[in-house]
Image: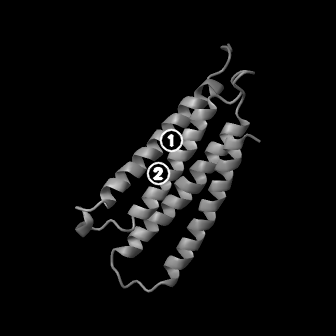
Amino acid sequence: MPTFSRWAIRLALFYLLSSWFLELWRLSQPHYVPMLPWAQRVTVFHLFFVGWLTQLIFGVAYWMFPTESRKRPRGSESLGIAVLVALNVGVVLRVVSEPLLTPSSQQSVWPILLVVGGALQWLAALGFSINIWRRIRGRGRSK
């Protein structure tokens, strides 16, 4: 198994467990702050779908898709590392900033971190798509 896939799948499992524990904690708390439960729910969904599901798909696809060439069987390894870093930094920034984003915090750093986190996730998806494109385009046309 490639190193990228190993790390992506390990981190995906970490985010899966984190989303479960955060949801259990969220459900056990009294809801005395009106905006907090909604923000926590968004954070849990983000951990689950982007942190776990997207990262698991990236890891398994990088591992299982057809090879590109003998010299570079899985495409650019440095782009793969950049994708992994960007996706995880983006998830962490979103998880930290989303619950703290309130109407009164618009002049703080939280909206900026939220946008940066989203942009990093978008760039990670773009980088993954670029890296895997040659592996899925096919070697020849079939009739």
> Which amino acid type is marked by label 1?
Ala
Q: Which residue is mark 1?
A: 124
Q: Residue at x 22, y 61 (%)?
A: 107
Q: Residue at x 32, y 54 (%)?
A: 112
Left/right placement of residue 14 relative to residue 1 reads left
What sort of colour scheme is used for the picture? one colour
Asked if 20 appears above or below 71 in the picture, the reply is below
Left/right placement of residue 32 relative to residue 29 reads left
> Which amino acid type is marked by label 2?
Gly
Could you tell me if the residues under marks 1 and 2 are in contact, i.e. CB atoms within 8 Å? yes
**Label 2: few (<14), some (14–19) or many (≥20) C-alpha neighbours in 10 Å:** many
Left/right placement of residue 61 relative to residue 33 reads right
Rendering quarter of residue 12:
bottom right
The dot on residue 90 is 2
Q: Identify which residue, 108 or 126, lies in the foreground.
A: 108
Mark-to-mark CA distance, 1 and 2: 9 Å
Q: Quadrant of the N terminus?
A: top right
